[in-house]
Every structure is written in C-alpha cells, then in structure tokens.
Amino acid sequence: MLIIKKFSASWCKPCHALEKVMDDIMPSYDTSVIYEKIDIEEDVDSTGKYQIRGVPTMVFEVDGKIVERIVGLKSGNEIKNIIDQYVK
C-alpha cells in the first residue's frame, strides 16, 4: 500500500496550489493509496521525523519505507507518474 504524506503550512501559497492538484488526482485512486495532510506547525514531531526542511514536501512510503520524496509544487502528471509506479 502506498502512503502519501503531504507536509504544508497555512501561509504557504505553493502548498495551497498543490492541495488543488491533489484534490483533482486523488479521486482516481481507490483505497490502495492513503493520502495524509500534515501541517508542519501543528505536527512538529512528524516534521522532525521526516526531516522536512521546506514546504510543500511530499513523502511516498511503501511498507514503511520512503520510496520517493519531492519538494516544491509539481504538476498532477508528475505526481500521477510517481503514484503509478507503486500502485498496481
């Protein structure tokens, strides 16, 4: 199972744009993808654990292991390509 953790902040404009991208693409995937939204100011423990240095950052995990990490605003197609590598 693929878990996507999106780290963002309320003051981050690219984070808001990425949220819209994710809202558009996530309905394409069923329960084989778990999508978690993490506010770096509210969940400091996760921010430290995943060594988040900038937002937006997306961490992709399979079986508890990080398989991809992207920083910054990416297109829906770029994100779909990553998801499709791990979802069969």
Image (tube, grey):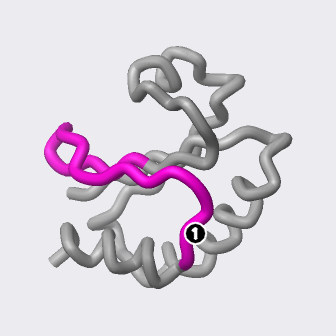
Residue 12 in the figure: left or right of residue 7: right
Residue 87 in the figure: left or right of residue 20: left
Name the residue that disc number 1 marks.
22
Quadrant location of the C terminus?
bottom left
Q: Which residues are magenta?
A: 59-75
User: Going 73% across and 58% down the picture, which residue do you hit?
Assistant: 14
16 above or below 82? above
Dividing the picture into quadrants, the one containing residue 19 is bottom right
- What main secondary structure does the magenta stretch of the protein show? strand
User: Going 81% across and 55% down the picture, which residue do you hit?
Assistant: 13
Task: In this rendered view, identify the residue nearer to me: 18 or 32.
Answer: 18
User: Going 53% across and 79% down the picture, which residue do you hit?
Assistant: 76
Task: In this rendered view, identify the residue nearer to me: 15 or 38.
Answer: 15
Q: Residues within 10 Å of mark 1 (few under 14, many from 20)?
A: some
Residue 66 part of the magenta-drawn span: yes
User: Going 60% across and 80% down the picture, which residue do you hit?
Assistant: 24
33 above or below 51? below
- Amino acid, disc 1: Met
Tell me the SS state at disc 1: helix
Residue 10 part of the magenta-drawn span: no
Q: Residue 50: percent from the left, percent from the top?
A: 40, 28
Q: Residue 54: percent from the left, percent from the top?
A: 60, 37
Residue closest to the far right: 11
Residue 47 in the figure: left or right of residue 82: right
Q: Residue 56: percent from the left, percent from the top?
A: 61, 48
**How many numbered discs?**
1
